[in-house]
Amino acid sequence: MTVRVNLHPPADFAELLTMYLHWLILSLSLVWWVSADQVCNSSEYDNAHAALFENLGLFNDKSLVKYIRPVTKNTDAIMVYILLFVTSITDVNEKAQSITTQLKIYTWWTDMRMDWDSSKYCNIYSFITRKDLFWTPNIAVQESIKTEFAAAESQYVEVRKGSVSMEDILSLTTACSMDLYRFPFDTQVCSLTFRSFIYRDYEIDIFGVSDSTSAYKQSFKIPGEWQLLDITQSVDHRGNVIYKMTIRRKPLVYVINLIFPVFCFLVLDVASFFINAAEADKLSFKVTLLLSISVLLQVLNDRLTATSSDIPLIGVYCGVIFTLIGFSILETILVNILIAKGEKAKSVTPEETRAAETGQNDHVNDLNNSPETIENEEPTCMIDIGKKSSLWTRAAKIIDVTYIVLYISTIIVFLSIIGKIWLQL
């Protein structure tokens, strides 16, 4: 009997073997991954943390980790990274030229002494511990006037392989040079300069980590009176990181409480020209308007700073309207004087007119004249008095009409110019 052995397996057998080899390789990989990723219980994690702290020298009070600045092999400078978020603007003081902001600051720096084999310590890649166990960079804001922590200063840092990081939430009051020329339609740019006041440029390299504008706006939780437009970061020649915060004021409250009332006073002053000038209420009404604007000017003076190089446009706006109403009061007084002169001339009797013209002796002589002569002279005197009275009244009307035309024209031109500059049209 002849037995034939087929040394060439069929094609389907080779495919089956290849598939099993793939599964075998995948199974071995999973076994290796599970064995590499140690599953530790709580006591083993505690022991691993204690061993890791011992290895890093954090249990030793004489350890140099918290006293000496860490350096790398390639350079003596430490790379410190800063990420800034503005969560709210709590106060803007125009007179003191300062701004108070709520900030969230992330700071992390390289520390190659914090390096370990995580596979030997239950795969611990990071841990959180007390800040006083580590050296921390002394970085502060140069423009700071007052710095307060939101609740309390964070006493902890997060340690990762090769780096240490910390997070602070601050209420920071900084100096900010403000341009109030277009108040309340103004946009301000305030700088926050992060620098180290102890270490030199070659000892610490500070890097500002920029984020997208949308992320900054999402972190801005309490808008309030101001709107956050943008935050940009740059580095000056000394290596300091400068964050420039662009904010815009929301002017609605000032338009309602200041600009619109002054404009209404101006409209009322124009309407007062149609009040009879002979009435005393017109003058008192205009004086009341002037006093009302004086109160608003006092409110404006308490709000704005006196050290501004340029007069704010809102000061020009209120000042010019105050002056216009002041001239309007003077014009009303002049018209009243002319009308009073006309009324006085109208009330003079013929005997008083002749006495004023010829003197007392002539007046005595006129008493000896016949009644017919006096009756013939009375119409002539009354005509002269009527002409004189109408002359004063006509002059008052001409002045009143001319002034109101010039007054309204001046108002239209002034409001057009200041509105164009104010709103930058």
Image: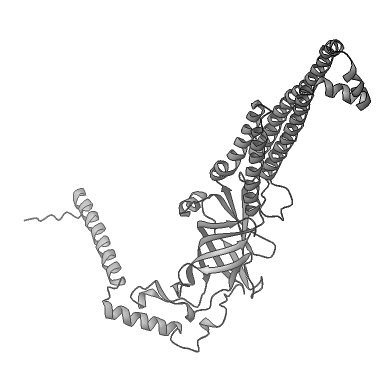
Above-or-below relation of 112 to 207: below
Q: Quadrant of the C terminus?
A: top right
Residue in view at x 38 percent, y 74 percent = 118
Q: Quadrant of the N terminus?
A: bottom left
Q: Quadrant of residue 286?
A: top right
Q: Quadrant of residue 395?
A: top right
Residue in view at x 50 percent, y 89 percent = 62
Q: Nearer the viewer, residue 369 or 113?
A: 369
Q: Nearer the viewer, residue 231 or 123?
A: 231
Whether residue 51 sits left or right of residue 214 in the image: it is left
Q: Nearer the viewer, residue 53 or 424?
A: 424
Whether residue 332 sits left or right of residue 358 in the image: it is left
Tell me, what colour scheme is on the image? one colour
Asked if residue 49 shows in the view, the reply is: yes
Q: Residue furthest left?
A: 1
Above-or-below relation of 335 to 176: above
Count of marks, rendered view: 0
Above-or-below relation of 265 to 236: above
Q: Where is residue 231 shown, x and y percent of the image?
A: 57, 53
Q: Where is residue 401 shown, x and y percent of the image?
A: 73, 23
Q: Where is residue 353 shown, x and y percent of the image?
A: 85, 22
Asked if residue 424 shows in the view, the reply is: no
Q: Where is residue 237 shown, x and y percent of the image?
A: 70, 62
Above-or-below relation of 163 to 57: above
